[in-house]
Image: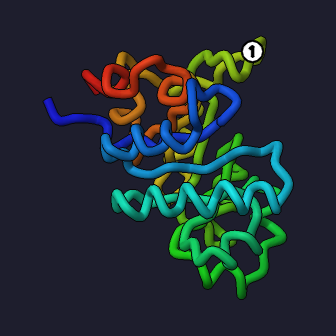
Amino acid sequence: MKSSIENLICVTNRHLCKGDFFTRIEEIVKHKPKAILLREKDLTEAEYESIAREVLKICKKSDIPCILHNFIDTALKLNADAIHMTFSMLRIMSAEDKKRFRMIGASCHSAEEARKAENVNCTYIIAGHIFDTLSKKNIPPRGLDFFKEVISNVSIPVYAIGGINKDNIKSVLDAGASAACVMSGPMQCENVDEYFNGW
């Protein structure tokens, strides 16, 4: 069976990371995921730029796309060609800035948001959370029917997020996902090679 690793976007969270964060990124990109999404929501823009500079180098060395998060000025300063936004931030992003990115993603939580994101030149959408996940404790998952509804309302790629693992990734890909996002697994696992084994 073909590996699903090429359909994985690894979302970072250095607070979950076992050991050195940059070493962990190096270990992940060796397995050739679809992309790294450098999230790190708690950082100031200056702090984020410092980390982004290093992660972009690591990803470039392994020819893995690196998607930066929210800080448009930092992404432009570092010549990044991909950025992920909250839906509210995407709506106020200037047309001029949008032209400077190859990929612009947004997190959407309804089919209506997804349609609006596509209408303002978003190139992909992350929708979720699909399954139960520790990062969304006590919040019921939206499920595969929600995910299929989002997909049916847009013509751009939709990536699934939330509780995705090697046992259920096939169900989101079969539902039409262009990729699946994982965070806690690759960040928290004791051994990255073992984590990716079997995808």
Horizontal side, residue 168 vs residue 25: left or right: left
Examine the image and state in which quarter residue 17 appears: top right
Q: Nearer the viewer, residue 100 or 106?
A: 100
Where is residue 55 shown, x and y percent of the image?
Answer: 55, 55
Rendered view: 195 above or below 103 = above
Amino acid under disc 1: Lys
Where does the image place residue 71, in percent across and percent down from the top left? 76, 64
> The C terminus is located in which quarter?
top left
Residue 40 relative to residue 60: left or right? right
- In the rendered image, residue 116, in percent from the top left (x then y), is placed at 70, 61
Q: Residue furthest left?
A: 1
Work out which quarter of the rendered image holds the N terminus and state it: top left
Label 1 element class: loop
Q: Is residue 4 above or below residue 82?
A: above
Residue 75 x/y as whole percent: 67, 70
Residue 154 seen in the current view = yes
- Residue at the (57%, 24%) spot, across then down: 18
Colour style of the rendered protein structure: rainbow
Find the residue positioned furthest to the bottom.
96
Q: Quadrant of residue 60?
A: bottom left
Q: Residue at x 73, y 70 (%)?
A: 74
The total of numbered circles placed on residues is 1
To which residue does mark 1 refer?
137
Q: Which residue is at a point 61% across and 63% down the rendered structure image?
A: 53
Disc 1 crowd rating (10 Å Cα; few below 14, some 14-19, many 20+) is few
The answer, for residue 148, to whether it is visible in the render is no
Q: Is residue 13 above or below residue 36?
A: above
* Residue drawn 70% across the image and 41% down it: 109
Q: Say which of 136 and 183 sits in front.
A: 183
